[in-house]
Image (cartoon, helix red, strand yellow):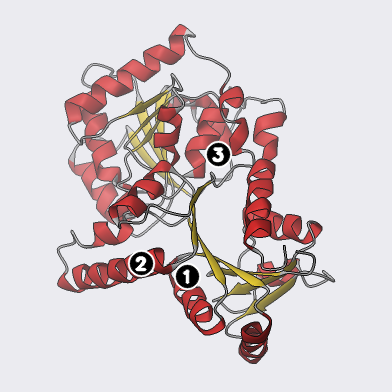
């Protein structure tokens, strides 16, 4: 295995901490790591500029280098491909076909996003959703291995008829969440006390996040729980639509769109409940962060929430329908459950989600699939 190459192909050029730590770990295990981004050179390339072992290239800036290196794979065939994201996987699939090398897809994108696009009122969006879902079905069926990061992504693979060589390893979360003492940011000065108590939701203001449903459920919830507020942290294209809905429902002083924030831990620690109404996810790291900070969750059956339920975490409740009454009951139940103290230390449940364990498992996978083993 010593000297075997791993090409990590990803879309963005920002410093994705998980990805950079994975590349560094694989390098320490003796792999020769080449990180390729579809976007032009950026922060992630600067991160490895002084590295003597890890090479970071951009399709837009280093195309000839990549082409030359890719052509050598046809002769050597000592390289494994690891692709993250839809467009990245399309490129990796092309390299796999030309070089006849092993491809592992990290299924980290929102599992049912293209399926969701097909429900749009726009004909153009529906056609794009149909095309891209067919494309993803093709590469999922033709790849050698698939790294499935949650039960939702595994279920989607099964719906495509893919059942073999699925490597079920969680995306993982920083070891510090599982080892460091939790210092709760309760009663800090940054939050306006006028919004207490509050329910929290975090996510892009995008259609697939389904914040409209959260707002509708909240409107019903406060009929019997009039002291609560709803805080939605995130920014996106639906801000105007959501604010209009809030104003028209007379909730302007009760529902707060606070945009991007840097004090997420403070928001989480002071929340009575975290709610997640998304139509689809990949892993949804924020849900893991919320649980590791001992907050209860009510979620749709998406991302890691399904894995949490399977582990019988008492402070996670899955609501499988968009019935408002059912959601209101679930919100009340989880708030009461947390108040009762009838729950266990979440870090003991989720040890296997630590990024260090994930990196070890992925390294073992690449060692098994390397031609030089």
Instruction: Sort mark 2 into few (<14), some (14-19) or many (20+) by Cα contacts within 10 Å.
Output: some
Left or right, residue 365 beside residue 236: right
Residue 357's x, y, as percent? 66, 41
Left or right, residue 158 beside residue 203: left
Residue 162 falls in image quadrant: bottom left
Q: Earlier in the sequence, mark 3 or mark 2?
A: 2
Q: Earlier in the sequence, mark 2 or mark 1?
A: 1
Residue 345's x, y, as percent? 58, 18
Q: Which mark is residue 264?
A: 3
Q: Can you say whether 308 is above or below 120 in the image? A: above
Residue occupied by mark 1: 89
Q: Is residue 82 something one can see in this rendering?
A: yes
Residue at (58, 82) in percent of width and height: 59
Seen from the viewer's position, the closer of residues 6 and 111 is 6
Q: Earlier in the sequence, mark 1 or mark 3?
A: 1
Instruction: Sort mark 1 into few (<14), some (14-19) or many (20+) by Cα contacts within 10 Å.
Output: many
């Amino acid at each position: 295995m010593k000297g075997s190459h791993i090409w990590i192909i990803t879309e963005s050029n920002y410093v994705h901490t998980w990805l950079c730590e994975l590349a560094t770990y694989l390098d320490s295990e003796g792999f020769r790591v080449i990180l390729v981004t579809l976007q032009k050179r950026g922060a992630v390339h600067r991160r490895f500029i002084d590295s003597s072992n890890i090479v970071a290239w951009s399709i837009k800036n280093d195309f000839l280098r990549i082409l030359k290196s890719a052509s050598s794979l046809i002769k050597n065939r000592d390289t494994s491909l690891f692709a993250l994201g839809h467009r990245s996987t399309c490129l990796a699939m092309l390299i796999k076909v030309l070089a006849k090398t092993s491809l592992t897809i990290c299924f980290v994108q929102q599992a049912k996003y293209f399926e969701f696009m097909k429900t749009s009122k726009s004909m153009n969006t529906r056609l794009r959703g149909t095309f891209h879902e067919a494309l993803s079905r093709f590469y999922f069926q033709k790849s050698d291995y698939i790294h499935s990061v949650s039960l939702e992504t595994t279920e989607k693979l099964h719906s495509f008829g893919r059942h073999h060589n699925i490597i079920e390893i969680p995306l993982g979360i920083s070891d510090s969440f599982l080892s460091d003492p939790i210092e709760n940011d309760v009663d800090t000065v940054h939050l306006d006390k006028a919004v207490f108590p509050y329910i929290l939701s975090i996510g892009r203001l995008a259609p697939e996040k389904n914040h409209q449903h959260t707002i509708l459920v909240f409107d019903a919830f406060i009929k019997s729980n009039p002291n609560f507020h709803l805080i939605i942290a995130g920014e996106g294209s639906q801000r105007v639509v959501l604010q209009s809905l809030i104003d028209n429902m007379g909730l302007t002083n009760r529902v707060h769109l606070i945009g991007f924030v840097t004090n997420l831990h403070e928001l989480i620690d002071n929340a009575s409940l975290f709610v997640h109404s998304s139509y689809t996810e990949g892993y949804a790291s924020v849900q893991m962060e919320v649980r590791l900070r001992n907050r209860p969750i009510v979620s749709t059956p998406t991302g890691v929430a399904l894995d949490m339920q399977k582990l019988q975490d008492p402070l996670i409740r899955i609501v499988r329908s968009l019935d408002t009454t059912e959601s209101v009951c679930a919100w009340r139940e989880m708030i009461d459950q947390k108040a009762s103290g009838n729950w266990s230390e979440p870090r003991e449940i989720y040890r296997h989600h630590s990024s260090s364990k994930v990196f070890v498992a992925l390294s073992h996978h690449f060692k098994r699939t390397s031609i030089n083993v």
